[in-house]
Image: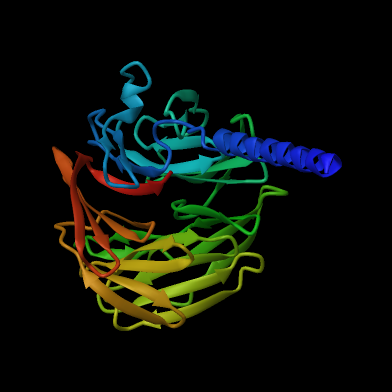
Amino acid sequence: MKISKLIASAFALTLLFNISCRNEDNYEEAIPKGAYENGILITNEGGFSTPTASVSYFSNDFAKQEDNIFKTNNGNAVLGNVFQSVGFKGDLAYLVLNVPNKVEIVNRYTFKKTNSITANLSTPRYIAFANNHTYITNNDFFSVRKVNIYDNADNFVKSINFDRYAERITSSSNYIYIQTDGSTYDASYNELPTGHTITRINPLTNEVDKVITLNDEFIIKDMTSDANFVYVLTSNDSTSNFYKIAASTGIAEKISFENVAGGLKLAIDQNKIYMISSAKKVFNITGNTANELFSVTANNIYGFNVINGNVFVADPTFSSDSKTRIYSLTGTLLKTLTTGIGTNGFYKN
């Protein structure tokens, strides 16, 4: 009996120790990384000639909105103007500012600035990362059309120039894909395609290894990716084309959506692909079909994303505060936010 009781006591102590360790591990894992974890970063472009760009934070539970978080956490520092896009690398967020020709690097959870990139930038637009390198497109729509490459310490390495465009950029399957065509205008201000190319860079060599020419005459509107595929949207006033490019091979599959007039932007959320059109309609892309979900309210579709099953649409103004509307996937308006000047993007943080 004494031996049995001794064994039972030892077992109880072991169990208590294991539970304590597990509780301690769980406690350590639950330590927050910063005030802006578990939310959405909202980017506000600002005015072209005034330094009014800003970043807002909106919590996942819709309970908290905080504006001007870059300024608040960096001694009232001015972010700049024409805030174009954000890229994430680990715990860092790279804030790409078009007119000041700089990229501000902050901790994505505290928004404390850690560094800046300015070398060789000229109207930077979008950013991507692969193989310990950073890739930033520069495009002034006149003479500057290049991607700059930086090393893991954010030092400039080289530029690659393109003939017509250097716009959206993304990383998939250990390759970098760049939108190298877009649109121009004729004498009557009609929008025309410059061409139809997507260019691939191999990060192992930092050289172009493939140019994909899209099989249509529409204007390239958007490009995004997941781990294995790059998705490109082209459209005119009556039809939209959707390309699914296998990132490892560069082979493109084209799908035409005759029921989608003027496809504008793409979004990926929980392995599902969404699209919004100039007619202010949201679609879910499934296989070869674009399924209309609902219509949104907006004067101008400028920013669009789907995050955690909620649809974010920016309806901007460029001289005063903008409106952001958040919808469920069934079209219920969940929330209307007042956001900064020229709201243009939503990023899951």
Q: How many marks?
A: 0
Q: Is residue 217 at all visible to an observer of this figure?
A: no
Q: Residue at x 29, y 82 (%)?
A: 259
Residue 71: quadrant of the picture:
top left
Q: Taking 245 as reference, is 203 left or right?
A: right
Q: Residue at x 38, y 70 (%)?
A: 234
Could you say where residue 193 lies in the image, as x and y percent from the top left? 36, 65
Q: Taking 102 as reference, is 258 left or right?
A: left
Q: Could you say which is closer to the camera, residue 332 or residue 99?
A: 332
Q: Is residue 147 at all visible to an observer of this figure?
A: yes
Q: Could you say which is closer to the camera, residue 14 or residue 10?
A: 10
Could you say where residue 32 lies in the image, as x and y percent from the top left? 48, 33
Residue 257: quadrant of the picture:
bottom left
Could you say where residue 325 lies in the image, as x and y percent from the top left? 21, 54
* Outermost top residue: 75
Could you say where residue 301 lies in the image, as x and y percent from the top left? 23, 58
Q: Residue at x 37, y 22 (%)?
A: 73
Q: Is residue 128 above or below residue 208?
A: above
* Outermost right residue: 3
Q: Could you say which is closer to the camera, residue 236 or residue 183?
A: 236
